[in-house]
Image (cartoon, helix red, strand yellow):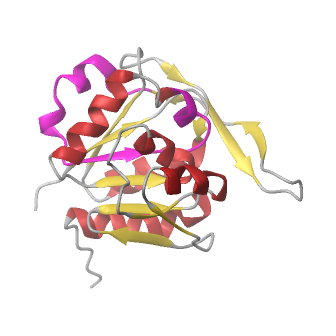
């Protein structure tokens, strides 16, 4: 099976692990992941964040490693047909890129074409910004996103920190601690089989 192309939607201060771990795992098995950010081009730097739960009422945020964007946003925008799936990484990026009409149009394309949609942590905020994407779906996300999922017509699934959930071709998870399960389910949806000899 030839590798698939996955479009990763990010913004500055998207969660570090949800970019690096996901991209490297997918590329390790032969898929291509294009990391894009509105108004950034290939070679530009994306700043990331790292969220953790350390005993406070909400997560703490630290500066993560820089990511080099590997695909110009405007090029990806004009080549959506070449992608097999879209991935919405979490962190703080989703809260502002979801208001970008171009990002909304990208998500709408994958929804209308019934292509796989992958979302983790705050990534669901991007999906909620497009009417109908989560309606009727069972979706996992960071607990703080539960009201938004419900108001958008979805059913929030309170997953454990290491679980992923699959509803049709939508794969979701609560946060970066679930990346192993999340990636495993994304690979299944993409039709990727890994055999050990």
In this orientation, which residue lies closer to the viewer: 133 or 46?
133
Q: Quadrant of residue 14?
A: top right
- Left or right of 81? Residue 53 is right
Q: Residue 107 in magenta? A: no
Q: Residue at x 43, y 37 (%)?
A: 129
Check the picture and name the quadrant holding the C terminus: bottom left
- Judge from the rendering whether residue 135 lies leftward or rightward of residue 128; answer left or right: left
Q: Quadrant of residue 65?
A: top right
Q: Is residue 92 magenta?
A: yes
Please report the residue visible at 26 percent of the width from the left and 63 percent of the height from the top: 169
Stretch of the chain drawn in magenta: 69-96
- For the point 42% across and 16% down, which residue is it? 40
* Rendering coords of residue 11 (x, y %): 51, 28
At x 61%, y 31%, the residue is 13
Residue 176 % position (x, y): 58, 57
Q: Quadrant of the N terminus?
A: bottom left
């Amino acid at each position: 099976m030839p590798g698939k192309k996955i479009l990763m939607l990010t913004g500055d201060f998207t969660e570090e692990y949800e970019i690096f771990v996901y991209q490297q795992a997918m590329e390790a098995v032969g898929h291509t992941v294009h990391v894009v950010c509105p108004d950034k081009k290939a070679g530009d730097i994306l700043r990331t964040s790292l969220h953790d739960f350390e005993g406070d009422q909400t997560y703490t945020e630290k500066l993560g490693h820089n990511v080099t964007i590997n695909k110009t946003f405007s090029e990806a925008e004009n080549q959506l047909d070449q992608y097999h799936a879209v991935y919405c990484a979490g962190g703080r990026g989703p809260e502002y890129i979801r208001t970008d009409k171009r990002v909304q149009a990208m998500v709408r394309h994958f929804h209308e074409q019934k292509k796989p949609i992958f979302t983790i942590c705050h990534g669901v905020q991007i999906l909620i910004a497009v009417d109908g994407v989560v309606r009727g779906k069972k979706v996992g996300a960071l607990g703080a996103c539960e009201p938004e999922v419900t108001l958008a017509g979805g059913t929030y699934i309170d997953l454990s920190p290491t679980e992923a959930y699959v509803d049709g071709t939508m794969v979701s998870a609560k946060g970066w601690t679930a990346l192993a399960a999340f990636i495993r389910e994304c690979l299944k949806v993409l039709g990727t089989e890994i055999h050990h000899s």
